[in-house]
Amino acid sequence: MPDAQLTYAGAANAALDRALTERPETLLYGEDVAVPGGVFGVTKGLLKRHGDRVFDTPISEAAILGSAVGASMFGRRPIVEIMWADFALVAFDQIVNQAANVRYISRGRLSAPLTIRTQQGNAPGACAQHSQSLEALFAHVPGLTVAMPATHQDAHDLLLAAIWHDDPTVVIENRTLYHGEKRAVRLGGPVPGIGGAAVRRPGTDVTVVTWGAIQHAVLDAAQRAAAEGIDAEVIDLRWIRPIDLPTVLGSVRRTGRLLVVHEAHTVGGVGGEVVAAVAESGIRLAAPPVRLGAPPARIPAAPHLAAAVLPGAADVLGALRALAGDGVHGAVA
Amino acid sequence: MPDAQLTYAGAANAALDRALTERPETLLYGEDVAVPGGVFGVTKGLLKRHGDRVFDTPISEAAILGSAVGASMFGRRPIVEIMWADFALVAFDQIVNQAANVRYISRGRLSAPLTIRTQQGNAPGACAQHSQSLEALFAHVPGLTVAMPATHQDAHDLLLAAIWHDDPTVVIENRTLYHGEKRAVRLGGPVPGIGGAAVRRPGTDVTVVTWGAIQHAVLDAAQRAAAEGIDAEVIDLRWIRPIDLPTVLGSVRRTGRLLVVHEAHTVGGVGGEVVAAVAESGIRLAAPPVRLGAPPARIPAAPHLAAAVLPGAADVLGALRALAGDGVHGAVA
Amino acid sequence: MKSTTELADHLRVMHRIRFTEEAITALRAAGDVVGSVHLCNGQEAVYAGAVAALDLSVDAVFPTYRGHGWALACGVAPRAVLAELLGRAGGISGGRGGSAYFTAPDHGMFGENSIVGAGAPIACGAALAAAYDGSGRVALAAFGEGAMNQGAVHEALNLAAARSLPVLFLVENNGYSELTPTDTMVRNDQLFRRAAGYGMPGARVDGNDPVAVADAVGRAAERARAGRGPVLLEAMTQRIVGHYIGDAQQYRPAGELDAALAAEPIRRAEEALRAGGVAEAELDALRAAVRAEIDTAVAEALAEPLADPTTVLEHLYA
Amino acid sequence: MKSTTELADHLRVMHRIRFTEEAITALRAAGDVVGSVHLCNGQEAVYAGAVAALDLSVDAVFPTYRGHGWALACGVAPRAVLAELLGRAGGISGGRGGSAYFTAPDHGMFGENSIVGAGAPIACGAALAAAYDGSGRVALAAFGEGAMNQGAVHEALNLAAARSLPVLFLVENNGYSELTPTDTMVRNDQLFRRAAGYGMPGARVDGNDPVAVADAVGRAAERARAGRGPVLLEAMTQRIVGHYIGDAQQYRPAGELDAALAAEPIRRAEEALRAGGVAEAELDALRAAVRAEIDTAVAEALAEPLADPTTVLEHLYA
Ligand SMILES: Cc1ncc(C[n+]2csc(CCOP(=O)(O)OP(=O)(O)O)c2C)c(N)n1
Ligand SMILES: Cc1ncc(C[n+]2csc(CCOP(=O)(O)OP(=O)(O)O)c2C)c(N)n1
Ligand SMILES: [Mg+2]
Ligand SMILES: [Mg+2]
């Protein structure tokens, strides 16, 4: 399969291009996605190449999402963009009360194979209404599937999997990743199915479960921890619903230690789900599990203030030291 | 302080009446709350007694919630009703992106002392869009405070505490409790502050943390378990944000066993937060903690189908047996 | 003559709806049906007329929780509607939807919706699909006049207008938003006038006259099918029952209900047919025939087994 | 004569806004200000005119993320706006709000809003409070023309009309929703005409003429204060910059920007003053004075300490 040198945004664009090419029933629409090619340029060129299946919409999230639900019930496969995950909250009903119910209530006579592309998280200077990490809100809803790609390859693969998936799927990207350096991205391979975590760094001393852009800070910290003799295994959950528990449990069984890191607020975040699932599994840990997320605060706009709220590599390193820095490693017999 | 024989709905009505009487800055509005006295009759008589501070609104949740945010910034203390928690999702932005930010962004120069009264959960025959238990969606949001009264006294006390509270507070009632038998309710006492769980049944063998209407099924099960020699301590969380961790941890430290029961879907539910907090505390448990909630499904309308999805007393009893039925009790040394 | 047979056909549909809902009322009183049930008694002409003007082999209807009448007009068997409310295996949604959220896609009825206004953008999606599948589909979004104040309806109206989508927005104006008179919740209660702001035609129609409704919907559908965009129709009607079964309706001014009963569509249709020379015996026969049909449907529905609770976890995902 | 001094006063405010945003643009280019910044260059007449017609001792303004101009017109010190964007301790919101979400309640400016349309219902609440506090407050909700398609704005328009709330809905029609021409997103681009559907007056006003804006807002405010309800004003203007700093504006047709520059309010105001007999020297002096004021403000803002990061967990709850 061909390799291409692409940015994360380019990888997502390639996935959209392939979907529009191979699946004539796909539609791509949202605010500024067609003529402008997206406020982040992710959908550039797609209108030109695919014509009237790509179009711009009014600033009407309920109409965007609701029409996607309706179109998907009639054989279309809409890929709609909600520019920021924060904005999904003006029309959350269409996702939770509408899209998620279509297949179940009709007992499979109808389905809603739609993909909601959005992006979230803090970026320098972003205000509190443009900085939230809201995956926990989507992940609690039966009927939805939720992906959070954080690598170039996943920006392509997870989006493709979501579009091919026959139920409503939310793909949460991260704008701080869009225009970084280019990387080799495998294109044209078989379309992957949904689900499945990825071990980004194998390790023996502590399992770090993370997802989204923050994992790059986690990998930095893991590397620095390695220099201190702490060998962390870093798992990128990638799919927030369903969660790949076997991979998580298998790792924790080996390391006996668990750290969960996400950019979202700790309280009520998906980290709680991961820690709870591990606790329920009965795996005996050598140390209490630890969640590292944002403390109770809104996200301030000034970068140095946001940095004081959001977890960073230094916090992760500190947590790794506290959790696994005692030299005693491995699970309790 | 006077005792009155009231239904759960009557207790909430009494709290609203007192608030409207003692706090001239309160407003009470929403769909059908004034002239009709509420679709569940909870606000009956309040328009008559308090006049134009009580009024009906169009079917416009964004306008109801947004105007409450605005009015609360200008010295009013709005108490607005969202008829079903499910409906909050058509205007979730006003709660999460607006109300929750007012104090923080203005560094306290503005505040949003508003109370959102709603109710949730399944009731016989209710459809999937009128049956969800959504507390996890509210509980993840810093800046919000969330209560779930399940007793007659709490229907009064928690609502009063919420109204007196100087920040946006969501009070989630349950319509299956509104018109049950009357009970003695203490009125006129000092207005309680927010927060604090309640031990509904002291016990030694296993800690059951629960909240909302389902706790009545939990108490039934606990009683039946007692006959089998399982002495369960039942804690009603009452406040979902903030969670009263000291009470939960103190109990688990004594019993060494934890069961969390809620009507909401298990995955991504607040039960995960409770289990995670206990795991993080380092308290050694005699058995893995257990969460009992709804499995991944939408809520079907037919009562016997809904019963097959939602946890009930029998499920709780089964969980208690599996968790503490081994005769060995108490925490691990 | 044509108009007589046309009206008689409408009357048959209206009887079917009325008798089915009378049966539901009895079943609810008996406790066989539980939960809140929204009847459409008094509004039957809207459904009979509108559906008669559509081509359900391609068109799609998106009603609300007050959807029994829509389903029956679309040709869903009364037995299947009754079985749904009874949680029977043969219910149109196998007991998943209940009274307020069932769906009958095989009959062009793409789901009730229990979130006020939420069906309007979904209907836009059905119309949007038509632009690509060449079906010539027209989507009809039905909702109450109170829903006109819901944000999602506004966004749907604008999207449909902006993209000239083949959507008919049909407002069932029965005067009430649950227990509240809707004219107290708007400053301009001529809701059809909002259409101009979106650049689409809007009109009021006598919602108690199935022929008038069929005529207006038919012309709007033709226009939409021709690619000329959406239309907003405001059908003036009334409930002759409560918002839900058990609603005591204390909020209705004295005399209003009597006036509504005098104007209700079944009575009016029968009077018109009498005036048109149809014999009383014929009207009695029609009534009796439909009543018998519904009695049978009730018996059949009650005889069905309950939906199998071991299947409740199915169909969440493909 | 009056009109000359009035226009000169407006010009001073417009200069203050323009020079402040030119300074912001430079600070953004230098990397002192980060993140997306929405400038209002070209729309200054709306803010100067509207605020001049309000009584900020009681009235309340609710702008959008494009709010620098509103804040400055409301009397927020340029230093405090600049410091906010620079994350300085003296920023109007202590660096919490940044460019797109700061709030200046002490100046009658009750917060930018970065959720399109969300400020409209909040403004209704400020007006609702006025019905009880006897303040006589009028709330002004400002938003772009693209926001007219957002559900929350619709619900606010209807609620304000239904309850005759003293709200002015001021549409800043600059023709674009971010990078998309808004006239392609509606079928009727005369947005003020939507007002009639709600039963409120609606009108277009020349948004590049501060006197015309002040006049229209003043009359609407008087009407609202008298208890006669809301008004929808559509101020026709344009951006002479991108949606955000860095927007290359390839989406703008050739010539459009030149036309916009020819019509932009500061140039127009200066021409009018010249025509009115004001000497070039006076205009130069005014420009120079405001520029000096802003230069000082920039220096002061840059000299301030950063907001203290140890306080970021404060003020979440009382
Ligand atoms: C978003 C939302 N808000 C509120 C409700 C509660 N509710 C159900 S029916 C109804 C009244 C609707 O009135 P109208 O639109 O006129 O329709 P009708 O019931 O008269 O047919 C309300 C407020 C709801 N289901 N969804
Ligand atoms: C609910 C919501 N949807 C989308 C956005 C992204 N967005 C920010 S500004 C903007 C364009 C708004 O256009 P308009 O209302 O005309 O105001 P202008 O920017 O022209 O002043 C959009 C779509 C948002 N902030 N909020
Ligand atoms: Mg109605
Ligand atoms: Mg604009």
Image (tube, coloured by chain):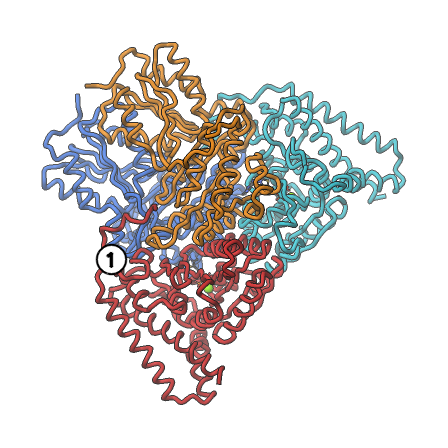
Chain colours: A blue, B orange, C cyan, D red
Chain containing the residue with disc 1 = D
Ligand 2 is found in the corner quadrant, namely: bottom left
Where's residue C99, x and y in %? 60, 32
Amino acid residing under circle 1: Ala
The quadrant the N terminus of chain A occupies is top left
Residue to which mark 1 is pinned: D307
- Near-viewer residue (D200 or C23): D200
Residue C198 appears in which quarter of the rendering? Answer: bottom right
| Image side of residue A60 versus residue A18, left or right | right
- Near-viewer residue (A132 or D287): D287
Where's residue A299, x and y in %? 31, 50
| Residue C133 appears in the figure | no
Where's residue A202, x and y in %? 19, 36
- Near-viewer residue (B315 or B107): B107
What residue sits 82% from the left and 44% below the top?
A: C3
- Looking at the image, is D313 positioned above or below residue B294? below
- Looking at the image, is B8 positioned above or below residue A95? above
Label 1: element kind: loop
Q: 10 Å neighbourhood of mark 1: few (<14), some, or many (≥20)? A: many
- Looking at the image, is D26 positioned above or below residue C285? below
